Image (spheres, rainbow, N blue to C red):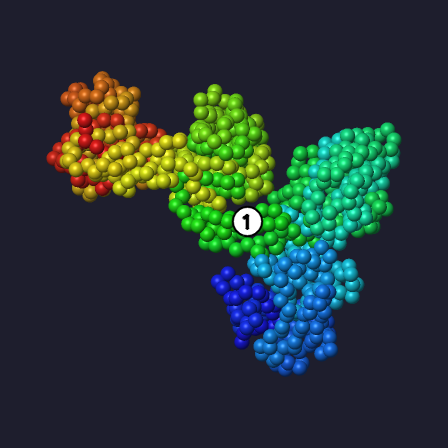
């Protein structure tokens, strides 16, 4: 059976983006209406569907105004036995509104198939009349569920009066999540659930995050006692009132506000600021009334017994409290939106009702308050608080997995997943050099316990604004605990970290220019930190206390954070980064900004040459500040890999960023095991560079590996068989002179030898008892990708020079080009 209880009709026709949750039906008059599948009932909003069992399972009677229960309603087979909604008789089955608009209702048949016809109301019609009439003035109840996130721009869902969940005694009502049953304010004949801060709904069943709190007749939020405000205080408040009277905020010394206190209230449309330092109150009244249902900005400054106040762009008014006392003692919490006991404070503040409306900003003495409950915000407790931005996404459709969020209490924006951009996430794109727009971020697995004592971090970035977080990883989401951050503040770059006993703050000596590329390098060893930015002087700092380890179990963020209210307060992060980030390196390992990300929001491409994909024939473009370089596959060369290499290469040349990689079993089996014999010829034009490497795909300090390379002009033969490494250095002759040199390196179990140019033999042995080399990542010659991380920082570049005549086990000659599985940036030796 299809449920179409009492629907609203919508202008337009059924499409993929229609609001209907289940089914959609076109009507003959250019409108459409929604219906639900079997087992569901159409919500009073006309487009979402409610599972019948969820309504039954609450074990509370679902009352109609004539007393019919939910069981009778759902099980009735006789249309005549169904009550008329709102006990309307046949003569009163229509409402006539102002301006001649009429809404008609019809009874339902036994299969709920008879449509209830509504006059379709255009959005424009309601908008034009919104100044003098709200939805409630139509006498049509409006119920919007937590999942109602779509409302067509050209219609408004006006539903026929449907099932009213009315409860007459608290025995019928089961409040959840700490809510409790109270009598309705407007009618003492019915009861409802009064919900604690963080929950809403008929049964307090819906979690609500009060980012922009909405207050009604008996709502309030309690914030901590004001500190350092006894002598002077500056208050900035942004609010949207829905009534001309109401208590907005107050605090003081005693619960009834006798003695010292402050209060901000609406009285007949004007703002009143009252304050008493102990000898008589001063009262400031705004020079103009507030604008109802619009955002108003109030600024108050008090210095001892003097105070100044300005509402919106009005004239600043001034006042003074009585007597000579100049300080205010605060022992009460700061209450917003009302009081838990309004009658107790009404005489003192001269207002009888609580505030009705929304708040979006409150700052006192530079502290911006977070209205969420204290585990993640500033609020200690509260009651009957809804979210003012709950409906802002109802007119926003995000595509391709985008998610609409409230950018303010008034409008929603689409947060696009990685790979999509646009106002509605409608455009697909290949992400190459990430661009962050101030609401973006990239999210990665946290560093955990991998940087307990030490971390090195390099970031190459180009800022477009002087503020924004580049990097953050933390321990808790309640504003406390360990963290590490890199943040732009007024153009200066700040490196902060907290090991649990206070934050180290290390700041660049000079501000950074916007619109140009910068390189920053930070390191931390224990409590000591270092910050190096471009060519600026190195800055050092130390964290207070005795703790020396950094634990970071939460996700790591680049270019922004998911919610600035969840980060450590001592990080001083207020906004996300605006600009480009092309490279992030952590402890020698380059982060793959796109491939390694767990998630990302609103990330586009920076204006950079690599975005144009200049490298031909499958070459990889690597950004290098404002420039780029191409890494060419075997068989291609040139600045943009545009040249095909046709000649046979017997002696390949390496550039420091080149390598050849082999997975051939005939090669790998002669590297691993308990013995090794390598002979090769090379020439080097630089003092440092990796000649040969074989190790594991995931390297660690105890992982097996074998390497041959140059350090400061001398040849090093190193290996670790699992119980410790040995380093055999041939220090009798330098080999970075650009001439050809021959090398022979051998190993039998733990014993190793090294000979250069037929000279003396140098030997050594690895410690411990293990004698087999166990590797799984093939053989690299001349270098490798991610060289610093794969070599555990033993090498930072490959060979700049040539290789030839590589022989394994005395008789297996490697064909350097044809045997290679892959190769990058290989040309013939000069």
- Which part of the image, by quadrant, shows the C terminus? top left
Q: Describe the element under mark 1 as helix, strand or loop.
A: strand
What's the residue at 75%, 38% (across, down)? 314
Identify which residue is drawn at 77% across, 30% down.
Answer: 303
Residue at far left of view:
811
Query: Is 667 on the left or on the right of 108, as rendered?
Result: left
Q: Quadrant of residue 281?
A: top right
**715 and 87: which one is in front?**
87
| In this view, 638 is above or below 82 | above
Q: Nearer the viewer, residue 728 or 273?
A: 273
Q: How far across and how far down the image is residue 821, in percent?
A: 22, 42
Q: Which of the pair 237/201 is nearer the observer?
A: 237
- How many labels sit on residues? 1
Q: Which residue is mark 1?
A: 413
The residue at 47%/31% (across/down) is 515
Asked whether 572 or 174 is in front, the reply is: 572
Instruction: Please indicate whether residue 803 sits to the left or right of residue 588 in the image.
Output: left
Task: Tell me the quarter of the picture where residue 710 sits.
Answer: top left
Q: Position of residue 194 (x, y in %)?
A: 71, 57
Q: Residue 87's x, y, as percent?
A: 72, 74
Horizontal side of 721 relative to 665 (left or right) equals right
Give the vertical position of 218 relative to 480 (above or below). Answer: below
> Residue 91: in sight, yes or no?
yes
Instruction: Decide: few, some or many residues near mark 1? Use Cα within 10 Å; few <14, some 14-19, many ≥20.
Output: some
């Amino acid at each position: 059976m299809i449920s179409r209880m009492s629907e609203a009709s919508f202008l337009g026709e059924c499409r993929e983006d229609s609001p209907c949750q289940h089914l959609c039906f076109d009507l003959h008059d250019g409108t459409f209406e929604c219906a639900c599948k079997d087992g569901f009932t159409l919500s009073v909003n006309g487009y979402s569907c409610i599972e019948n069992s969820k309504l039954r399972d609450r074990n509370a009677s679902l009352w109609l105004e004539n007393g019919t229960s939910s069981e009778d309603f759902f099980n009735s087979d006789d249309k005549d036995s169904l009550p008329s909604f709102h006990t309307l008789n046949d003569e009163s089955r229509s409402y006539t509104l102002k301006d001649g608009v009429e809404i008609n209702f019809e009874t339902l048949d036994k299969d709920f198939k008879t449509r209830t016809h509504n006059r379709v109301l255009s959005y424009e019609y309601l908008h034009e009349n919104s100044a003098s009439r709200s939805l409630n003035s139509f006498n049509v109840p409006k119920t919007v569920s937590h999942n109602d996130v779509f409302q067509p721009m050209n219609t408004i869902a006006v539903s026929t009066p449907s099932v009213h969940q009315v409860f007459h005694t608290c025995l019928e009502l089961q409040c959840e999540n700490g809510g409790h049953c109270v009598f309705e304010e407007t009618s003492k004949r019915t009861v409802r659930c009064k919900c604690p801060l963080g929950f809403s709904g008929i049964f307090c069943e819906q979690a609500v995050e009060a980012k922009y709190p909405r207050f009604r007749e008996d709502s309030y939020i309690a914030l901590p006692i004001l500190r350092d405000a006894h002598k002077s205080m500056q208050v900035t408040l942004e609010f949207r009132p829905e009534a001309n009277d109401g208590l907005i905020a107050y605090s003081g010394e005693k619960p009834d506000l006798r003695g010292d206190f402050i209060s901000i209230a609406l009285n007949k449309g004007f703002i009143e600021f009252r304050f008493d330092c102990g000898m008589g109150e001063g009262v400031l009244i705004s020079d103009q009334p507030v604008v109802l249902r619009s955002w108003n900005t109030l600024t108050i400054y008090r210095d001892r017994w003097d105070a100044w106040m300005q509402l919106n762009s009005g004239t600043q008014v001034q006042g003074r409290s009585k007597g000579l006392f100049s300080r205010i003692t605060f022992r009460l919490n700061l209450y917003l939106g009302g009081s838990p006991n309004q009658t107790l404070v009404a005489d003192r503040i001269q207002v009888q009702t609580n505030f009705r409306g929304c708040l979006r900003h409150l700052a006192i003495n530079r502290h911006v308050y977070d209205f969420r409950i204290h585990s993640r915000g500033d609020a200690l407790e509260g009651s009957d608080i809804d979210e003012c931005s709950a409906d802002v996404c109802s007119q926003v459709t995000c595509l391709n997995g985008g998610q609409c969020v409230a950018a303010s209490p008034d409008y929603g924006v689409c947060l696009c997943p990685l790979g999509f951009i646009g106002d509605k996430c409608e455009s697909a794109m290949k992400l190459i050099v990430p661009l962050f727009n101030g609401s973006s971020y990239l999210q990665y697995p946290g560093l955990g316990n991998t940087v307990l004592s030490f971390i090195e971090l390099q970031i190459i970035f180009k800022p477009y604004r002087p503020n924004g977080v580049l990097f953050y990883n933390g321990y808790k989401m309640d504003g406390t605990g360990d963290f590490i951050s890199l943040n732009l503040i007024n153009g200066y770059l700040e490196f902060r970290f907290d090991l649990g006993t206070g934050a180290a703050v290390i700041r660049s000596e000079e501000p950074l220019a916007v619109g140009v590329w910068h390189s920053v390098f930070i390191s931390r060893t224990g409590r000591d930190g270092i910050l190096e930015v471009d060519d600026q002087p190195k800055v050092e700092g130390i964290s207070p206390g005795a703790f020396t380890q950094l634990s970071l179990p939460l996700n790591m963020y680049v270019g922004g954070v998911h919610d600035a209210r969840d980060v450590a307060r001592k990080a001083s992060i207020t906004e996300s980064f605006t600009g480009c980030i092309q490279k992030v390196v952590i402890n020698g390992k380059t982060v793959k900004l796109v491939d390694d990300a767990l998630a990302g929001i609103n990330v586009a491409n920076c204006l950079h040459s690599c975005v144009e994909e200049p490298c031909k024939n499958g070459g990889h473009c690597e950004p290098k500040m404002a420039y780029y370089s191409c890494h060419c596959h075997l068989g291609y060369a040139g600045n943009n890999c545009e040249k095909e290499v046709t000649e046979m290469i017997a002696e390949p040349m390496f550039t420091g960023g080149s390598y050849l990689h082999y997975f051939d079993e005939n090669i790998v089996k002669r590297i691993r095991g308990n013995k090794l014999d390598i002979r090769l010829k090379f020439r080097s034009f630089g003092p440092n560079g990796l000649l040969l490497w074989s190790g594991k795909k995931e390297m660690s300090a105890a992982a097996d590996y074998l390497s041959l390379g140059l350090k400061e002009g001398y040849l090093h033969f190193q290996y670790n068989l699992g119980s410790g490494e040995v380093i055999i250095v041939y220090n009798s002759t330098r080999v970075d002179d650009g001439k050809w040199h021959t090398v022979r390196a051998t190993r039998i179990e733990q014993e190793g030898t090294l000979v250069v140019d037929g000279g003396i033999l140098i030997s050594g042995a690895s410690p411990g008892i293990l004698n087999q080399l166990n590797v799984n990542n093939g053989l690299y010659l001349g270098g490798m990708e991610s060289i610093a991380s794969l070599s555990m920082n033993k090498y930072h570049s490959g060979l700049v020079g040539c290789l030839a005549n590589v022989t394994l086990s005395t008789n297996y000659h490697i064909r350097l080009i044809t045997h290679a599985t892959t190769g990058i940036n290989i040309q013939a030796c000069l």
